[in-house]
Amino acid sequence: MLSIAERHKYILDKLNKYGFVRITDVANELGVTKVTIRKDVKILESKGLLYKVHGSARPANPHVADLDVHVKDNINRDAKRLIAQRAVELLDDNDSIIIASGSTIYSFAEEIKMRQWHHLNIVTPFLRLGVLLNEAENVNVVQLGGTVHKKSLSVLGEEASRSLDDCICSKLFFGVDGIDLEHGITTSTLDEAKLTRKMMKASSQNIVLADSSKFGQRGFGRICALEDIDVIITDGGIPEQMVAIVEEAGVDLIIVR
């Protein structure tokens, strides 16, 4: 039987490799009780080495704050650019799409602007995107109205939601603040989560653009379950265990490198 120190090392090594561990899995693998592993996790948490959440452990607190979009712009910029370049390849020349808001989404908009289109319709709540793509030739931007959320520079609320009633689009591209096994796809605010669900209903395919730092994180507002997403585009930093979980949920996972 492993010593306490050996169990602690085993738990931390698994966290480092997979991004999270389940208490039940570790107990079964080590041949000890779940009570024993819970005590181990509690000790490691008291030392600041992990964060315990409902039957599992993570390297850090998974709850994310509502950051200003200009702050997000400077986080994982290279990964976001690669994700954006891959996302553009999913567009058809005469598409009608919905694009939400966020820093990865803005990178996506910049890639759209650099390309030539025959006729592309874009519906968006994102004010920065509307201004940017208004200059693009053969790109028609429908800007949703509503209350401006200062941190995201996106409109929210019932007016924006009602405007989507008359939209029929092929694809929705949106960013998220968290992709979590237990809570699914999340964002920082309830209003944004609600509007995203409405955008999902107006589109035939739901595509998430998220760098690998979003896996294992969770925002305040739940958007949907993993199973409700058609495609996730992310970078090579995605935890190995999350790859299997996302694919088991029936999601088409695209990893850019």
Image (spheres, rainbow, N blue to C red):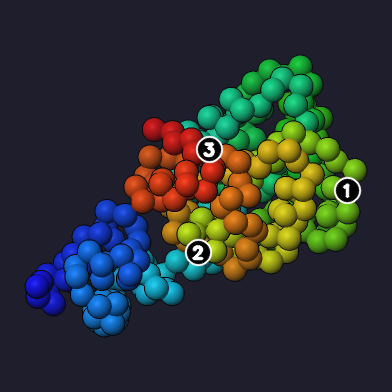
Q: Regarding mark 1 in the picture, which secondary structure is present there?
A: helix
Q: Which mark is residue 252?
A: 3
Please name the residue shown 44% across and 50% down the image: 245
Quadrant where the C terminus is found in the figure: top left
Residue neighbourhood size for the residue with mark 1, other residues' Cα within 10 Å, grouped as few (<14), some (14–19), many (≥20): few
Depicted 107 relative to depicted 37: above or below: above
| Tag 3 and tag 1, C-beta contact below 8 Å | no
Q: Looking at the picture, which amino acid does disc 3 mark?
A: Asp
- How far apart marks 2 and 3 lie (CA) works out to 19 Å
* Residue wearing tag 2: 182
| Residue 134 appears in the picture as rendered | no
Quadrant where the N terminus is found in the figure: bottom left
Q: Where is residue 117, by image quadrant?
A: top right
* Residue wearing tag 1: 165
Question: Is 95 on the left or on the right of 177, as rendered?
Answer: right
Q: Looking at the picture, which amino acid does disc 1 mark?
A: Asp
